Amino acid sequence: MSLAAIFVFLLVSALQTLDSVLDLARKREGITGDELKLRVEITQLLKEATALSTPSTFAQAAKLKRLAAAKEKELAKST
């Protein structure tokens, strides 16, 4: 193997790694405080809905799931 081939391989690998790191940094900057708050609320609502798994609490669990779905739509609109 020649040194040129190894150098090209290392250069391409470094550029791809740099591109993925920059892409990740751009994605992290895009999350605002309101989006983060909505994500936390959605997670909490779904946890509560999952905890209500008995037939007597089905209506309450369904209500929480609908509320979480509405918040997910709100989050999708804001992004």
Image: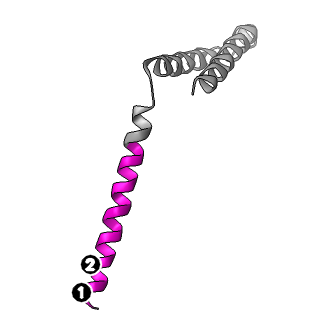
Q: Main secondary structure of the magenta part?
A: helix
Where is the N terminus found, in terms of image quarters? bottom left
Judging from the image, the colouring scheme is one colour
Q: Residues within 10 Å of mark 2 (few under 14, many from 20)?
A: few
Where is the C terminus found, in terms of image quarters? top right
Q: Is residue 69 left or right of residue 48?
A: right
Image position, residue 6 (x, y; %): 28, 81
Q: CA distance from mark 1 to mark 2?
A: 6 Å
Query: From what the image shows, is residue 68 above or below residue 56?
Result: below
Query: From what the image shows, is residue 31 above or below residue 65?
Result: below
Q: Which residue is mark 1?
A: 3
**Magenta-colored stretch includes residue 13:** yes
Taking the spot 26% from the left edge, 78% from the top edge, the residue there is: 7
Q: Quadrant of residue 5?
A: bottom left
Taking the spot 53% from the left edge, 18% from the top edge, the residue there is: 38
Classify mark 1: helix, strand or loop: helix
Q: Quadrant of residue 9?
A: bottom left
Which residue is farthest left?
A: 3
Image position, residue 43 (x, y; %): 54, 21
Query: What's the residue type where badge 2 is placed?
Result: Phe
Taking the spot 34% from the left edge, 67% from the top edge, the residue there is: 13
Query: What's the residue type where badge 1 is placed?
Result: Leu
Checking the image for residue 47, the label placed there is none
Please provide the residue range marked out in magenta.
Answer: 2-24
Q: Are marks 1 and 2 in contact (CB under 8 Å)?
A: yes
Q: Which residue is mark 2?
A: 7
